[in-house]
């Protein structure tokens, strides 16, 4: 590019962050300033190219981002010169949206086993998270452990008891909005463990007993048949 020529986006000459909101629409206009020749422009969304119409490429080019969602948060739009792609300018979308919660909301476990309740969260700005149980702030017991990251709030319960049964509520509170998601934990009675080895051994004994019984019966039948045949042989002689 000729000395003194620069790329701008929405009249800004440097990379910048664009604050926007869920469901809104943003227009990004890239232009070549102080150019002495016609320049073709390219747009990128992340690593992928944006398809541009033929009349939206030379010296200036615009892209429209409509129906902005939480998935657009952090996405980078970059405008480049086709003939020298080292010349570029970028815009990062900073999308504000209330907490969005998800997770496995029903778990049935056996008394004495371990369980994890994982509340996944997406929020910008980041939400303050906490657990409630049966509409009251959760009192952490020795078998409870809470872990929080920017993407989840996790409650681990080791050796669950009947008293752990109930509804656990994941509360996400951000400057925009408070959201709640319920997780239902059902603790059932511990099953009686049935030893497998004695059952297998008993089956083997029964099987062998039947086999020996069949063999003995077959021998007895064969002896009777041989005795029945002897008188006939003597008559024939």
Image (spheres, rainbow, N blue to C red):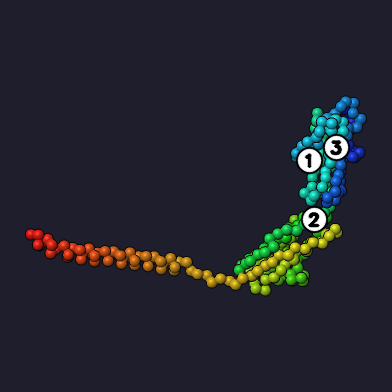
Q: Rounded to the nearest whole Å, what is the CA distance between mark 2 and mark 3? A: 29 Å
Q: Rounded to the nearest whole Å, what is the CA distance between mark 2 and mark 1? A: 22 Å
In the image, is 68 to the left or to the right of 184? right
SS type, badge 1: strand
Q: Residue at x 85, y 37 (%)?
A: 62
Q: Residue at x 85, y 29 (%)?
A: 39
Q: Residue at x 64, y 72 (%)?
A: 161
Closer to the eye: label 2 or 3: 3
Location of residue 46 with respect to 35 vertically, above or below: below
Q: Rounded to the nearest whole Å, what is the CA distance between mark 3 and mark 1? A: 13 Å
Mark 3 or mark 1: which comes first in sequence? Answer: 1
Q: Is residue 153 in sight in this rendering?
A: yes
Residue 227 lies, in percent from the top left, at: 17, 65
In the image, is 146 to the left or to the right of 53? left
Image disc number at residue 45: 1
Residue 20 lies, in percent from the top left, at: 86, 49
SS type, badge 3: strand
SS type, badge 2: strand
The foreground one among 160 and 229 is: 229
Image disc number at residue 62: 3
Residue furthest to the left in view is: 237
Closer to the eye: label 3 or 1: 3
Mark 2 or mark 3: which comes first in sequence? Answer: 3
Image disc number at residue 236: none
Asked if labels 3 and 2 touch by Cβ distance under 8 angstroms, the answer is no
Q: Is residue 7 in sight in this rendering?
A: no
Residue 27 lies, in percent from the top left, at: 86, 42
**Residue under label 2:** 123
**Badge 1: few (under 14), some or many (20 or more) residues near its Cα, within 10 Å?**
some
The foreground one among 142 and 87 is: 87
């Amino acid at each position: 590019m000729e000395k003194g020529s620069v790329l701008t986006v929405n009249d800004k000459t440097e990379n910048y962050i664009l604050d926007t909101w869920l469901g809104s629409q943003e227009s990004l206009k890239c232009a070549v300033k102080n150019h002495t020749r016609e320049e073709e422009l390219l747009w990128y969304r992340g690593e992928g190219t944006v398809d541009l119409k033929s009349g939206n490429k030379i010296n200036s080019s615009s892209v429209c981002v409509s129906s902005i969602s939480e998935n657009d948060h952090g996405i980078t739009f970059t405008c480049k010169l086709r003939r020298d792609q080292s010349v570029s300018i970028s815009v990062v979308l900073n999308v504000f949206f209330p907490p969005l919660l998800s997770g496995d909301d029903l778990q049935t476990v056996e008394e004495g086993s371990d369980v994890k309740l994982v509340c996944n969260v997406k929020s910008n700005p980041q939400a303050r998270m906490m657990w409630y149980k049966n509409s009251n702030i959760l009192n952490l017991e020795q078998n409870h452990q809470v872990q929080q990251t920017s993407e989840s709030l996790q409650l681990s319960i080791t050796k669950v008891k009947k008293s752990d049964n109930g509804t656990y509520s994941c509360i996400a509170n951000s400057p925009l909005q408070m959201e709640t998601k319920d997780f239902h934990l059902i603790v059932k009675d511990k099953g009686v463990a049935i030893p497998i080895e004695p059952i297998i051994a008993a089956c083997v004994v029964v099987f062998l007993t039947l086999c020996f019984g069949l063999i003995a019966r077959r021998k007895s039948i064969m002896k009777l048949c041989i005795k029945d045949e002897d008188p006939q042989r003597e008559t024939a002689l």
